[in-house]
Image (cartoon, rainbow, N blue to C red):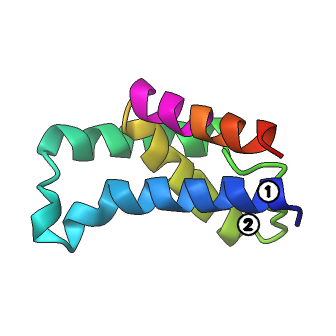
């Protein structure tokens, strides 16, 4: 794994953790019903369409792990276009700085 892939992976993990952080950290705010529904729809779309934001970064051969990546991608999708756009901008910036 090269440095760019490691940075992409770190940014993706940080984004997912920040998204679900209110589940265990009460000081991080609350997740609304609309956000939960949005993330569930994102997960369904990612699984049905087989969308994996980490394709090409992480090679997965076991189907269970692949579906975990689909779910994590769905969580990111469910946070909306600004979230996905911000994540994409951060990933592109990390790649171009190398």
Q: Which residue carries the number 1 mark? A: 5
Which residue appears at 36% of the width and 58% of the height? 18
Q: Position of residue 17 (x, y in %)?
A: 41, 63
Query: How far apart are the alpha carbons under marks 1 and 2?
Result: 21 Å
Residue ID at (52%, 28%): 85
Q: Find the residue positioned furthest to the front.
A: 97
Q: Residues within 10 Å of mark 1 (few under 14, many from 20)?
A: some
Q: Describe residue 77's horizontal placement relative to residue 31 as left or right.
A: right
Which image quarter holds the N terminus?
Answer: bottom right
Quadrant of the rendered structure where residue 94 is?
top right
Which of discs 1 and 2 lies nearer the camera? The answer is 1
Q: What residue span does the magenta drawing correspond to?
A: 81-88
Quadrant of res 81: top left
Query: What is the x, y in percent for residue 58?
Result: 79, 61
> From where the camera sits, is residue 84 visible?
yes
Give the dominant element type of the magenta stretch: helix, strand or loop: helix
Horizontally, is 16 left or right of 56 in the view?
left
Asked which quadrant contains residue 21, the reply is bottom left
Please name the residue that numbered disc 2 is placed on.
Answer: 63
Which is more N-terminal, label 2 or label 1? Answer: 1
Q: Secondary structure at mark 1?
A: helix
Q: Is residue 5 above or below residue 33?
A: below
Residue drawn at (79%, 56%) of the image: 5
Q: Is residue 43 left or right of residue 22?
A: right
Asked if the magenta segment contains residue 40, the reply would be no
Residue 42: % across, % down: 44, 39
How many discs mark residues in the rendered view? 2
């Amino acid at each position: 794994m090269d440095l760019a892939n490691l940075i992409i992976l770190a940014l993706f993990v940080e984004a997912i953790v920040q998204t679900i952080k209110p589940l265990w950290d009460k000081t991080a705010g609350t997740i609304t019903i609309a956000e939960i529904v949005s993330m569930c729809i994102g997960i369904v779309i990612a699984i049905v369409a087989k969308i994996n934001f980490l394709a090409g970064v992480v090679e997965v051969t076991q189907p269970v792990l692949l579906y975990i990546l689909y779910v994590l991608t769905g969580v990111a999708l469910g946070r909306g276009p600004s979230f996905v756009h911000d994540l994409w901008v951060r990933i592109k910036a990390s790649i171009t700085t190398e």
